[in-house]
Image (tube, coloured by chain):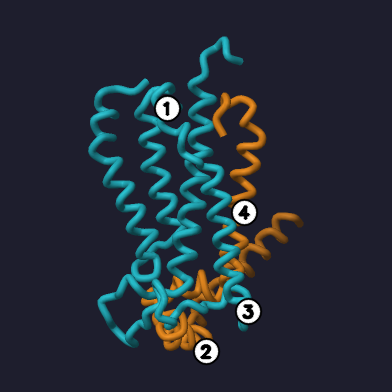
Chain colours: A orange, B cyan
Amino acid sequence: MRRALGLFAFLSFIILLLAVAISLRPFGEPPHAEMDTYFIEHAQEEASANNVVTSVVFDYRGFDTLGEATVLFTAVSGVLMALRHYGGKEK
Amino acid sequence: MTTTIIRTTTKILAPLILVFGSYIILHGHLTPGGGFQGGAVFASGLALLIVANNKEKVKELFDKVPLTQLESLGALGFLGIGALGLMGYTFLKNVIANSGLLFGAPTPKGINPGYLNTGGTLSYLNIFVGTKVLAGLTSIVLIFFLILRREKDEW
């Protein structure tokens, strides 16, 4: 009984994957995305930077970068707080 | 632990790695990379310098480097640049872009060779994040090195 159930789940999963693979969009033709187009067309004048990725990371999504920097800050403070006792008088 | 090979290689490679890290940080708004990546490259150069020297030399070298202060300066600078946007706009708004200040020159639209004096707050944020990442990673490497190089009787 369990083997039959397993075989059934296996086959249905394979059929699902095949169906998804057949219905994929052709390569290089992404679905319509207004936001991408906006970034590519306006980033140079709004953020005045050639690197659109940087203008997304530091300008349009600046809060995310602030969180990342906070994660690193917390990690470094934790390591130094836990280990400064063993590391001699440094830091 | 440090052989002649490592020391000689470090003498040649470390300046190049440090310069390359600074380049990635400063050109973050023009070329791939940015504060995080450039800071990591810079910190790897400093880690090479740490590994290639013995403990006394490292202590002498890094005693005067304010790593924890640099880390805090990076975080506070990021917040300060973000707070500049509160003058009439929102937090982290790019107020320096197209304003004519340092890093404030406008970028010509379309394909251009890339000018260093552009980017607005992006360039400042890249520099501050780079400072923060290089100080943080270097202080972690430094403290692990100092722990591993302790003599037995120091425990």
Label 2 – label 4 distance at C-alpha: 31 Å
Q: Residue tagged by mark 4?
A: A71
Q: Secondary structure at mark 3?
A: loop
Residue B11 location, x and y as percent?
25, 35
Comparing marks 3 and 1, which lies closer to the viewer?
A: 1
Comes first in the chain, label 3 or label 1 = 1
Instruction: Note whether B87 is above or below B36 in the view shown.
Output: below
The disc at residue A34 is 2
* Residue B82 position by quadrant: bottom right
Comparing marks 3 and 4, which lies closer to the viewer?
A: 3
Q: Amino acid at mark 2?
A: Glu
Q: Judge whether residue B149 can be spotted in this image.
A: yes
Crowd tier of the residue under label 3, counting other residues whose Cα lies within 10 Å: few below 14, some 14–19, many 20 or above: few
Quarter holding the N terminus of chain A is bottom right
Q: Nearer the viewer, residue A71 or B93?
A: B93
Chain for numbered disc 3? B
Q: Amino acid at mark 3?
A: Thr
Comparing marks 1 and 4, which lies closer to the viewer?
A: 1
